[in-house]
Image: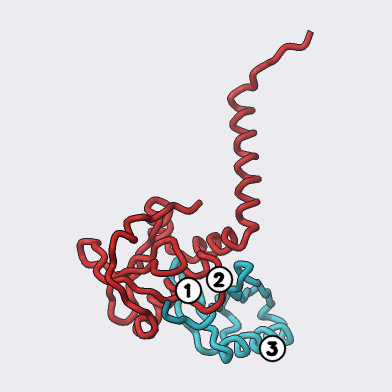
Chain colours: A red, B cyan
Protein backbone atom coordinates (compact mmCIF):
# COMPACT_ATOMS: atom_id res chain seq x y z
CA UNK A 1 0.00 0.00 0.00
CA UNK A 2 1.24 3.43 -0.94
CA UNK A 3 1.50 5.89 1.86
CA UNK A 4 2.12 9.60 1.79
CA UNK A 5 5.56 10.29 3.11
CA UNK A 6 6.50 13.85 4.04
CA UNK A 7 9.76 14.86 2.44
CA UNK A 8 12.78 15.29 4.63
CA UNK A 9 13.92 18.82 5.51
CA UNK A 10 17.06 18.48 3.37
CA UNK A 11 14.98 17.51 0.32
CA UNK A 12 12.60 20.38 0.94
CA UNK A 13 15.38 22.95 1.18
CA UNK A 14 16.97 21.58 -2.00
CA UNK A 15 13.63 21.78 -3.79
CA UNK A 16 13.11 25.35 -2.54
CA UNK A 17 16.60 26.30 -3.69
CA UNK A 18 15.95 24.91 -7.17
CA UNK A 19 12.60 26.71 -7.29
CA UNK A 20 14.25 30.00 -6.25
CA UNK A 21 16.90 29.50 -8.91
CA UNK A 22 14.27 29.02 -11.62
CA UNK A 23 12.35 32.11 -10.47
CA UNK A 24 15.51 34.20 -10.36
CA UNK A 25 16.57 32.95 -13.81
CA UNK A 26 13.15 33.92 -15.17
CA UNK A 27 13.31 37.38 -13.62
CA UNK A 28 16.83 38.01 -14.86
CA UNK A 29 15.81 37.29 -18.42
CA UNK A 30 13.51 40.30 -18.49
CA UNK A 31 14.90 43.76 -19.42
CA UNK A 32 14.22 44.96 -15.86
CA UNK A 33 15.97 41.96 -14.36
CA UNK A 34 18.96 42.21 -16.68
CA UNK A 35 19.34 45.90 -15.96
CA UNK A 36 19.15 45.37 -12.20
CA UNK A 37 21.77 42.66 -12.39
CA UNK A 38 24.08 45.00 -14.31
CA UNK A 39 23.44 47.75 -11.77
CA UNK A 40 24.34 45.47 -8.85
CA UNK A 41 27.54 44.41 -10.59
CA UNK A 42 28.64 48.02 -10.95
CA UNK A 43 27.73 49.17 -7.44
CA UNK A 44 30.39 49.29 -4.75
CA UNK A 45 29.95 46.70 -1.98
CA UNK A 46 28.53 49.26 0.52
CA UNK A 47 26.15 50.62 -2.15
CA UNK A 48 25.01 47.07 -2.91
CA UNK A 49 24.21 46.41 0.73
CA UNK A 50 22.43 49.74 1.10
CA UNK A 51 20.37 49.09 -2.04
CA UNK A 52 19.36 45.61 -0.86
CA UNK A 53 18.38 46.79 2.60
CA UNK A 54 16.88 50.20 1.94
CA UNK A 55 15.87 50.29 -1.71
CA UNK A 56 18.24 53.15 -2.47
CA UNK A 57 21.99 53.81 -2.54
CA UNK A 58 24.07 56.91 -2.05
CA UNK A 59 26.81 58.39 -4.20
CA UNK A 60 29.23 61.26 -3.70
CA UNK A 61 29.49 63.75 -6.54
CA UNK A 62 32.82 63.72 -8.33
CA UNK A 63 33.19 67.51 -8.74
CA UNK A 64 31.48 69.34 -5.88
CA UNK A 65 31.39 66.37 -3.53
CA UNK A 66 27.74 66.62 -2.50
CA UNK A 67 25.93 63.49 -1.40
CA UNK A 68 23.05 62.13 -3.47
CA UNK A 69 20.59 59.34 -2.92
CA UNK A 70 19.35 57.32 -5.87
CA UNK A 71 16.04 55.58 -5.22
CA UNK A 72 14.60 52.72 -7.21
CA UNK A 73 12.81 54.47 -10.04
CA UNK A 74 13.20 55.86 -13.50
CA UNK A 75 12.20 59.49 -12.91
CA UNK A 76 12.17 61.97 -9.99
CA UNK A 77 14.16 59.36 -8.07
CA UNK A 78 17.32 61.30 -7.17
CA UNK A 79 17.77 63.73 -4.33
CA UNK A 80 20.56 65.65 -2.72
CA UNK A 81 20.86 64.86 0.98
CA UNK A 82 22.34 66.88 3.82
CA UNK A 83 24.73 65.64 6.51
CA UNK A 84 21.76 64.26 8.48
CA UNK A 85 20.60 62.23 5.51
CA UNK A 86 17.55 64.45 4.89
CA UNK A 87 16.56 65.15 1.26
CA UNK A 88 17.14 68.82 0.49
CA UNK A 89 16.63 68.98 -3.27
CA UNK A 90 14.99 66.62 -5.74
CA UNK A 91 16.66 66.09 -9.10
CA UNK A 92 15.15 64.67 -12.25
CA UNK A 93 17.44 63.56 -15.06
CA UNK A 94 17.64 60.34 -17.01
CA UNK A 95 19.14 58.88 -20.17
CA UNK A 96 17.17 59.27 -23.40
CA UNK A 97 15.21 56.28 -24.65
CA UNK A 98 12.99 53.90 -22.86
CA UNK A 99 15.56 52.16 -20.68
CA UNK A 100 14.71 49.76 -17.88
CA UNK A 101 14.99 50.95 -14.31
CA UNK A 102 18.42 49.48 -13.48
CA UNK A 103 20.01 51.11 -16.53
CA UNK A 104 18.53 54.49 -15.59
CA UNK A 105 19.88 54.20 -12.04
CA UNK A 106 23.33 53.09 -13.20
CA UNK A 107 23.51 56.02 -15.65
CA UNK A 108 22.59 58.39 -12.82
CA UNK A 109 25.28 56.90 -10.55
CA UNK A 110 27.98 57.18 -13.23
CA UNK A 111 26.94 60.71 -14.17
CA UNK A 112 27.00 61.99 -10.58
CA UNK A 113 30.21 60.24 -9.61
CA UNK A 114 32.21 61.13 -12.69
CA UNK A 115 30.71 64.37 -14.05
CA UNK A 116 28.54 65.83 -11.33
CA UNK A 117 28.42 69.36 -12.78
CA UNK A 118 27.22 68.16 -16.16
CA UNK A 119 24.52 66.00 -14.56
CA UNK A 120 23.35 68.93 -12.46
CA UNK A 121 23.38 71.08 -15.58
CA UNK A 122 20.75 68.97 -17.30
CA UNK A 123 18.74 67.98 -14.20
CA UNK A 124 15.45 69.64 -13.36
CA UNK A 125 15.18 70.33 -9.68
CA UNK A 126 12.10 70.11 -7.50
CA UNK A 127 11.20 70.43 -3.85
CA UNK A 128 11.31 66.97 -2.30
CA UNK A 129 8.10 65.83 -0.63
CA UNK A 130 7.08 62.47 0.80
CA UNK A 131 7.88 60.76 -2.50
CA UNK A 132 11.32 59.74 -1.35
CA UNK A 133 10.06 57.93 1.74
CA UNK A 134 8.14 55.46 -0.39
CA UNK A 135 10.99 53.32 -1.60
CA UNK A 136 10.46 49.76 -2.68
CA UNK A 137 12.97 46.97 -2.40
CA UNK A 138 13.87 45.31 -5.67
CA UNK A 139 14.88 41.69 -5.81
CA UNK B 1 38.15 39.03 -23.29
CA UNK B 2 36.99 42.63 -23.00
CA UNK B 3 33.36 43.64 -23.16
CA UNK B 4 31.39 46.65 -24.35
CA UNK B 5 27.96 46.93 -22.75
CA UNK B 6 25.47 49.15 -24.55
CA UNK B 7 22.32 50.02 -22.63
CA UNK B 8 19.09 49.62 -24.57
CA UNK B 9 15.43 48.70 -24.11
CA UNK B 10 16.28 45.05 -23.62
CA UNK B 11 18.57 45.91 -20.71
CA UNK B 12 21.80 45.87 -22.65
CA UNK B 13 23.62 44.46 -25.66
CA UNK B 14 27.06 42.97 -25.05
CA UNK B 15 29.94 42.92 -27.49
CA UNK B 16 33.04 40.92 -26.63
CA UNK B 17 36.44 41.41 -28.18
CA UNK B 18 39.90 40.02 -27.66
CA UNK B 19 42.50 42.80 -27.17
CA UNK B 20 45.11 40.50 -28.72
CA UNK B 21 43.42 40.48 -32.14
CA UNK B 22 43.87 43.68 -34.14
CA UNK B 23 40.73 43.25 -36.25
CA UNK B 24 38.57 42.77 -33.13
CA UNK B 25 40.13 45.80 -31.48
CA UNK B 26 39.51 47.86 -34.63
CA UNK B 27 35.86 46.85 -34.66
CA UNK B 28 35.50 47.66 -30.95
CA UNK B 29 37.19 51.03 -31.49
CA UNK B 30 34.81 51.84 -34.35
CA UNK B 31 31.86 50.92 -32.15
CA UNK B 32 33.21 53.12 -29.35
CA UNK B 33 33.43 56.23 -31.55
CA UNK B 34 30.15 55.53 -33.36
CA UNK B 35 28.40 55.49 -29.99
CA UNK B 36 30.18 58.40 -28.33
CA UNK B 37 29.85 60.58 -31.46
CA UNK B 38 26.17 59.71 -31.40
CA UNK B 39 25.73 61.11 -27.89
CA UNK B 40 26.42 58.06 -25.75
CA UNK B 41 28.61 58.39 -22.66
CA UNK B 42 31.25 55.72 -22.10
CA UNK B 43 32.43 54.68 -18.65
CA UNK B 44 34.89 52.04 -17.55
CA UNK B 45 35.02 50.20 -14.27
CA UNK B 46 38.25 51.04 -12.46
CA UNK B 47 37.64 49.09 -9.24
CA UNK B 48 34.81 47.59 -7.21
CA UNK B 49 32.05 50.17 -7.60
CA UNK B 50 34.47 52.73 -9.01
CA UNK B 51 33.68 54.11 -12.42
CA UNK B 52 35.25 56.76 -14.60
CA UNK B 53 34.03 58.30 -17.81
CA UNK B 54 36.31 57.79 -20.77
CA UNK B 55 36.48 59.93 -23.87
CA UNK B 56 38.89 57.89 -25.92
CA UNK B 57 38.94 54.19 -26.69
CA UNK B 58 40.94 52.05 -24.27
CA UNK B 59 41.49 48.50 -25.60
CA UNK B 60 42.63 47.40 -22.14
CA UNK B 61 39.44 48.41 -20.35
CA UNK B 62 37.85 45.10 -19.38
CA UNK B 63 34.32 46.46 -19.23
CA UNK B 64 33.00 49.62 -20.80
CA UNK B 65 29.39 50.64 -20.41
CA UNK B 66 27.60 53.06 -22.75
CA UNK B 67 24.46 54.99 -21.89
CA UNK B 68 22.47 57.46 -24.00
CA UNK B 69 22.58 61.25 -23.58
CA UNK B 70 21.13 62.52 -20.30
CA UNK B 71 18.16 64.85 -20.33
CA UNK B 72 16.17 66.62 -17.65
CA UNK B 73 12.92 64.90 -16.73
- Residue B30, image x and y in percent? 66, 89
- Name the side, left or right, on which A110 lies relative to A126: right
Q: Residue furthest right?
A: A1
Q: Residues within 10 Å of mark 1 (few under 14, many from 20)?
A: many
Quarter location, residue B56 = bottom right
- Name the side, left or right, on which A88 lies relative to B32: left
- In the rendered structure, are the residues bearing label 1 and label 2 in contact, judged by CB atoms less than 8 Å apart? yes
- In the rendered structure, are the residues bearing label 2 and label 3 in contact, judged by CB atoms less than 8 Å apart? no
Q: In the depicted view, which residue is nearer to us: A75 or A60?
A: A75
Disc 2 target residue: A99
- In the rendered structure, are the residues bearing label 1 and label 3 in contact, judged by CB atoms less than 8 Å apart? no
Q: CA distance from mark 2 to mark 3?
A: 28 Å
Quarter location, residue A68 = bottom left
Q: Residue furthest left?
A: A84
Q: In the depicted view, which residue is nearer to us: A83 or B29?
A: A83
Depicted A27 relative to depicted A93: above or below: above
- Residue A126, image x and y in percent? 30, 73
Q: Residue at x 42, y 80 (%)?
A: B72
Which chain is home to disc 2?
A
Disc 1 target residue: A107
Disc 3 target residue: B26
- Residue A71, image x and y in percent? 39, 62
The N terminus of chain A, quarter of image: top right
- Name the side, left or right, on which B44 lies relative to A34: left
Quarter location, residue A46 = bottom left
Q: Secondary structure at mark 2?
A: loop
Depicted B56 relative to depicted A13: above or below: below
Q: CA distance from mark 1 to mark 3?
A: 26 Å
Amino acid sequence: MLRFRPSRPSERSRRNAVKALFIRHGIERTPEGRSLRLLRQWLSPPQRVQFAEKGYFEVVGGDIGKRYRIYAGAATNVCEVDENGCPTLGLCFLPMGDLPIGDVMLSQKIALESSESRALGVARSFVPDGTFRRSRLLR
Amino acid sequence: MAMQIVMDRTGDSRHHFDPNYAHEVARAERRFYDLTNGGFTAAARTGPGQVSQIRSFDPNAEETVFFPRLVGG
